[in-house]
Amino acid sequence: AHVWRGVLREFADRLGVTDASTVVTLGEGGTPLIPAASLSRLTGADVYVKFEGMNPTGSFKDRGMTVALSRAVEHGAEAVICASTGNTSASAAAYAAHAGITAAVLVPEGKIAMGKLSQAVAHDGRLIQIRGNFDDCLEIARELATGYKVHLVNSVNPDRIEGQKTAAYEVVSQLGDAPDFHFIPVGNAGNYTAYSRGYREEAARGVATKVPRMFGFQAEGSAPLVRGEVVKHPETIASAIRIGNPASWELALEAKSATDGWFGAIDDDRILAAQKLLAGTVGVFVEPASAISVAGLLDRAEAGVIPAGATVVLTVTGHGLKDPQWALRNTDGSQVEPLVVDAATSEVASALDLTPVQ
Ligand code: F0G
């Protein structure tokens, strides 16, 4: 039987890993590519979902964190630091715990999902809430990593991008070729950059016959790449991508033009509707930021940009359990109230509208 060994060992030749390399892994990568029949029916395309919530800490960040932490430990680092909207901090804290070193994590006060906050705490991260937004946190993390003995593991660290591009390798191997279109959420645009790089490598190696058009999506209130300027006060319920000044701005623009790509903006209501559609018709529960890939596909299909029969892959970046509150909210803003009945079989049968066996 084959046991998945994490991205550094599975893609050792591609990532320059040898038997002598330090490998800090929780077995990340190897995530499912799930056919989405309901989305295929809606759009006329052949749609697949790359479910990155299946990584050890519940997001795609683990692919990059295994590389960043391995290299940090190899270089003798005793502490790593990151700024985060939540998932990076969860991943950094978990991998640092596994490696036996310290992770300092800077997060915007009150603006990260409870699941992610609890992960950073559970893994003994040195969690600091900053009175500011993500962009403030990143600026401070970068300055600390320059002036103090602490190693930066945000996606401005190229090791992160190196690890994250393995998701594109996996898609090519799971589909037998690259897709025609790839839809992905964009915050700092590190992951957009990473997939673009991974796909281009596969095409250059002759493993894929094409490079997909990379379609990246930002939340309407946090869409600097769409607007072409920094957003000073980014707002969205998709807290993971509440970012006004993407760290990988230049790399993303390069990747966009190299892949004939596109950046679009989606409002919060459509993000939440897409989250519900994906959970209810595909069986994949993702956090709001991740559902923007689905909303983006519907938007582009409506615009007539997706030809019938095109192969489309959507990356959904984080698990729904990270930020479950949105699923428990009705579209009018009220709370979902699960039905309560007496502990009697007949009561339950009637509440479920079950038909008796004759
Ligand atoms: N989706 C999720 C669930 C994320 O957590 C992030 C980024 C993204 C998409 C966007 O990826 O930044 O590479 O464009 N989260 C970072 C964090 C900022 O701190 O966890 P990106």
Image (spheres, rainbow, N blue to C red):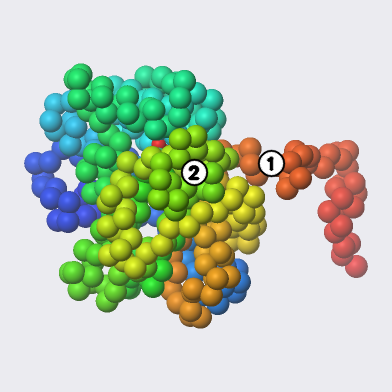
User: Which residue does the numbered mark 2 point to in the structure image?
Assistant: 222
Q: Position of residue 265 (x, y in %)?
A: 51, 54
* Count of marks, rendered view: 2
Quarter of the image with the N terminus in it: bottom left
The first of marks 2 and 1 along the sequence is 2
Task: Relative to 155, say whether 198 is above or below.
Answer: below
**Which residue is most to the bottom?**
308
* Residue 351 numbered tag: none
Q: Position of residue 297 (x, y in %)?
A: 52, 64
* Residue 328 numbered tag: 1
**In this picture, residue 154 sits left or right of residue 134:** left
**In this picture, residue 225 sits left or right of residue 47:** left
Which residue sits at x=9%, y=41%? 20
Between residue 191 and residue 263, name the one nearer to us.
Answer: 263
Mark 1 is surrounded, within 10 Å at the Cα level, by few (under 14), some (14 to 19) or many (20 or more) other residues, namely few
Q: Amino acid at mark 1?
A: Leu
Residue 172 can be seen, yes or no: no
